[in-house]
Image (spheres, rainbow, N blue to C red):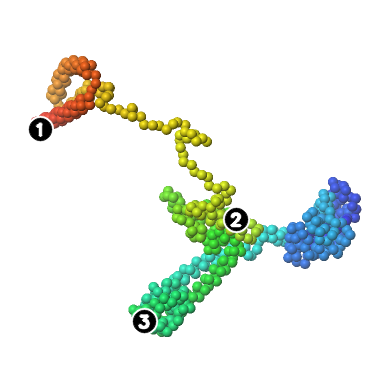
Amino acid sequence: MLVLFETPAGFALFKVLDEGKLDKVEDLWKEFTSSDSARKVVELKAFNKFENTSDALAAATSIVDSRPNKGLRKFLKKHCEGETLAVADSKLGNAIKENLKIDCLHNSAVMELMRGLRNQLTELISGLGTQDLGPMSLGLSHSLSRFKLKFSPEKVDTMIIQAIGLLDDLDKELNTYAMRVREWYGWHFPELTKIVADNIQYAKVVKMMGNRTNAVNLDFSEILSDDEVEAQLKEAAVISMGTEVSDLDLLNIRELCDQVLALSEYRAQLFDYLKSRMNTIAPNLTALVGELVGARLIAHGGSLVNLAKQPGSTIQILGAEKALFRALKTKHSTPKYGLIYHASLIGQAAPKHKGKISRSLAAKTALAIRYDALGDGGDNSIGLESRVKLETRLRVLEGKELGKSAGSAKGKPKIEVYDKDRKKGAGALITPAKTYNPAADLVLGHSTEETPKKPEGASKKRKHHDAEVEETIQEDGDQEGQKKKKKKKSKESEESPVADADGGKKKKKKSKESEETPVATAEDVKKEKKKKKKSDSQDAAMETEESGKKDKKKKKKKHSDE
């Protein structure tokens, strides 16, 4: 039986000298305590050395994926004919058996044997020292870890960050240069600014035409697609109000037009480059929000991995940090979107639905970014599926409902009108419908109740009010005024029992009248109300006259004292 052992330096084949010792798995480790005892159990039959680090990495990655590479297949065909091969990986053994028709073995005894071989490896393989094995294993482990992380130069997002930054700078420079061309050439031909709106077409027309007098003899069909615009240009050139310029001025203007056209061509090339890089690095993000918005999100986040760590709520307002903190400081509503606002899905939505769509788009964008940054697949299937769901949701919000809403198995539930009198689950009402009862109406002509009369309570309130007014005057007045007021109070107290007696008599008379006239008419009630109002107004007038007289007395006393 042969044993296949992988080392950082190459593949080794050991021949088992005593297969009977493999039956005692528990005691097998004792045979590898020393190099002499290990040589009695196994011996080296063949060794396939790696030529360089790339070969070692290719062999190690194939072993990790449980498949033999080309060099290992040749090595095993040469040395393993008619032998049983012990391997450390059962999947690798199945692959060798299918491809090379070599019987493979994998069990606990083989694993214990591999452990012993690893312990005495430098002694069993001549020419492989410990000082050489350490650096080899370290370099191979670093290379293998890079491969496991699938680190590739095509996944570097630094190029995207630089490209989108340069694209924004080019847009600013192009705008500045184009405005300078319009302003400079506008002195010579000011009407051209309104006729040709596009900056690139304007620069091409100026470069071709030069002096405006040449416009009549030139053909602008390659630059201007519309014949009417060309006709307007030629008519305006004849009757232009611009000033004359020299040939040297026109030469400098044409050089500036060359710069504008060169920058526009380079911008187009840069945009194509950015588009290809975005489709390679973040295909799902590109399918959802587009190349420019996706690149700006990556640049704002710092990298694709950093952006993948952010939740959907952060991605939604990424780029609107100033507005967010200003809203938190002033306790106003926070912004609903940042850079993501420029995505085509949000542009399609109505203003009242932009907030909902931006929230949904941010959640799907977060998932797409995580899949692009950390997933193994390179397709944009998740991005396309998410875009279809968002478009369906947008149509549902706008009223163009489909049979089913996006992502759900059920349609919209029917909304029933709420009725508090209707039983749950039944069509009948809890109480019958109420009808109008005319007998419950109140008619004043037929009322039997007596009208309330409160003359005594009103008179008592007036007396109490007069007493309070008099007390306030007592505190401010002199001693003579206090004596006069005390006399008035004593007189009123002597007259009060007589008034009470008269009031009692009046009550008796009223009770008799009520017994004699049990039913009061509506006219009597109105007359009594008018009498009450007159008495109240008379009492108020008396009080105001008394208070005016007292004030006059006070003023006279003050003048006399002075």
The correct choice, above or below, for 20 with respect to 466 in the image is: below
Q: Indicate which label's residue lies in the foreground, 2 or 3.
A: 3
Q: Does 51 sit above or below residue 397?
A: below
Q: Secondary structure at mark 1?
A: helix
How far separated are the C-alphas under marks 2 and 3? 62 Å
| Earlier-in-chain disc, 3 versus 1 | 3
Residue 238 numbered tag: 3
Q: Is residue 506 left or right of residue 409?
A: left
* Alpha carbon distance from label 1 to label 2: 98 Å
Residue type at tag 2:
Arg
Q: Nearer the viewer, residue 386 or 370?
A: 386
**Coordinates of residue 335 in the picture (x, y in percent):** 46, 53
Q: CA distance from mark 3 to mark 1?
A: 102 Å
Residue 487 is drawn in which quadrant? top left
Q: What residue is shown with label 1?
A: 559
Q: Residue at x 43, y 77 (%)?
A: 227
Q: Amino acid at mark 1?
A: His
Which residue, given by chain and number where applicable, does mark 2 sit on?
370
State the residue at coordinates (46%, 79%). Answer: 221
How many C-alpha atoms fall within 10 Å of the one at disc 1: few (<14), some, or many (≥20)? few
Q: Nearer the viewer, mark 1 or mark 2?
A: 2
What is the quadrant of the N terminus in the image? Answer: bottom right
Q: Amino acid at mark 3?
A: Val
Mark 3: give few (<14), some (14-19) or many (20+) Cα within 10 Å: few
Contact flag, marks 2 and 3 (Cβ < 8 Å): no
Circle nearer the N terminus (1, 2): 2
Screen quadrant of the C terminus: top left
